[in-house]
Image (tube, rainbow, N blue to C red):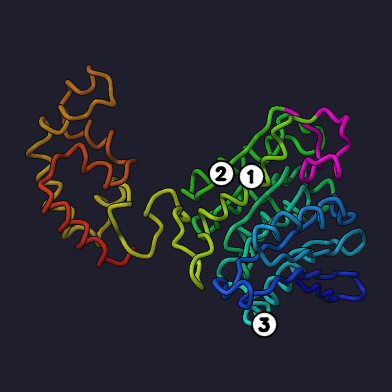
């Protein structure tokens, strides 16, 4: 492994530390590596050492190229300078993808507290968006972050369908950054069908970093499960990015969105309601909807996940109420369509752009 220390802005003391592992050679099956950019916290007044190198080590062990950005703070923190620092760092990482032996489309960002706010901004409003974002006890509400940096934006309001998958961890009784910050961010992700994983622990102080006694005083009242967020996040990144395979990463098992409604092409992973209202899907859905109308009574009789009194009201309207928020692939199970019809629908939808 080699270390590079890069000054991005000498006046503002913005630096990027790169921990770079070998690919090839003794790691013959690895041609490139995923990467993670760490943004320490510190209330936009400093960049915490406790949330820098100690955090980098587990991701190095997991095979990542790891970068630590010490962004603009104190008198230099006026927004959007920290976000501009992030943009510069991420652009540099991707520009040097070949030299640094990393996948430019598998770069995550991990931020803590105010650094978590910056990571949230990166995920929602940056030009150089990460491919995944991890937010630890992050500030996301404008009224809270603006106590540190008056011009800093509200992350929750910036969440949209283009937001990358997110991993969120915090403690319920955080006395510095109220848990509402994480909860409102998660709610915004859910409203836009963005894939996320969340670990909200019962108790623990703000700024626990990895939760190890090397960075958090062992007598702290800290939930014993808090340190598990590190391994959980590494496992989650494997789900999102894939794992090391033969000279390439394996296919991810988790999509960027909970449903296919936001994917480039239509598919049976889209919700039934989205497809039945999508103009481009009419050629496929019109005959299917006609079939549903003719077989409503039979279909409703197959549904065992709703109260009997609703199932007895075997109307098309009630079927739509049940089906619209579920993916078409799941609805097939209750419809009882002939297999050849299901296959034909799946094939036809995959040819239709999701515009």
Residue 76 falls left or right of residue 346? right
Q: Main secondary structure of the magenta part?
A: loop
**Distance between mark 2 and mark 1 Cα atoms:** 6 Å
Front in this rendered view, residue 33 or 116 = 33
The part of the image, by quadrant, that contains residue 253 is: bottom left
* Mark in the foreground, 3 or 2: 3
Q: Residue furthest top?
A: 309
User: What residue did someone put label 3 on?
Assistant: 99
Front in this rendered view, residue 229 or 114 = 229
Above or below — where is 240 with respect to 298? below
User: What residue did someone put label 2 on?
Assistant: 197
Q: Secondary structure at mark 2?
A: strand
Assess whether mark 1 and mark 2 are in contact (beta carbons under 8 angstroms). Answer: yes
Q: Is residue 122 magenta?
A: no
Q: Residues within 10 Å of mark 2 (few under 14, many from 20)?
A: some
Name the quarter where the N terminus is drawn. bottom right
Where is residue 74? Give x, y as percent.
Answer: 91, 58
**Distance between mark 3 and mark 2 Cα atoms:** 32 Å
The part of the image, by quadrant, that contains residue 119 is: bottom right
User: What residue did someone put label 1 on?
Assistant: 168
Assess whether mark 3 and mark 1 are in contact (beta carbons under 8 angstroms). Answer: no
**Distance between mark 1 and mark 3 Cα atoms:** 31 Å
The part of the image, by quadrant, that contains residue 313 is: top left
Q: Is residue 208 magenta?
A: yes
Over which residues does the magenta segment extend? Answer: 203-221
Query: Tag 2 or tag 3, which sits nearer the N-term?
Result: 3
Q: Secondary structure at mark 1?
A: strand
Above or below — where is 258 with respect to 18? above
Q: Residues within 10 Å of mark 1 (few under 14, many from 20)?
A: many
Where is residue 203? Give x, y as percent.
Answer: 74, 28
């Amino acid at each position: 492994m080699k270390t590079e220390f890069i000054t991005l802005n000498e006046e503002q003391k913005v630096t990027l530390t790169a921990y770079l592992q070998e690919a090839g050679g003794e790691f013959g099956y690895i041609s490139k590596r995923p990467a993670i950019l760490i943004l320490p916290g510190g209330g936009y007044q400093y960049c915490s050492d406790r949330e820098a190198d100690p955090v980098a080590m587990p991701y190095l062990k997991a095979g990542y190229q790891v970068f630590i950005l010490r962004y603009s703070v104190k008198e230099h923190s006026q927004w959007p300078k920290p976000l501009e620092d992030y943009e510069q760092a991420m652009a540099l990482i991707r520009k040097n993808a070949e030299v640094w032996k990393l996948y430019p489309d598998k770069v995550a960002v991990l931020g803590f507290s105010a650094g978590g706010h910056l990571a949230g901004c990166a995920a929602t409003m940056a030009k150089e968006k990460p491919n995944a974002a991890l937010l630890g006890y992050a500030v996301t509400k404008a009224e809270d972050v603006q106590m540190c940096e008056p011009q800093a934006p509200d992350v929750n309001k910036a969440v949209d369908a283009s937001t990358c998958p997110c991993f969120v961890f915090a403690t319920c009784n955080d006395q510095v950054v109220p848990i509402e910050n994480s909860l409102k961010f998660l709610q915004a992700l859910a409203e836009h069908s963005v894939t996320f994983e969340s670990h909200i622990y019962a108790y623990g102080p703000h700024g626990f970093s990895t939760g190890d006694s090397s960075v958090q005083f062992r007598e702290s009242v800290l939930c014993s499960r808090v340190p598990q967020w590190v391994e959980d996040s590494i496992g989650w990144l494997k789900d999102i990015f894939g794992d090391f395979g033969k000279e390439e990463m394996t296919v991810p098992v988790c999509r960027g969105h909970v449903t296919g409604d936001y994917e480039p092409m239509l598919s049976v992973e889209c919700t039934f309601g989205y497809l039945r209202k999508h103009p481009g899907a009419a050629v496929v859905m019109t005959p299917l909807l006609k079939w549903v109308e003719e077989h409503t009574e039979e279909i409703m009789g197959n549904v065992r996940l709703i109260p009997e009194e609703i199932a007895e009201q075997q109307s098309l309207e009630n079927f739509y109420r049940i089906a619209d928020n579920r993916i078409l692939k799941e609805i097939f199970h209750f419809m009882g369509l002939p297999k050849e019809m299901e296959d034909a629908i799946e094939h036809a939808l995959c040819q239709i752009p999701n515009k």
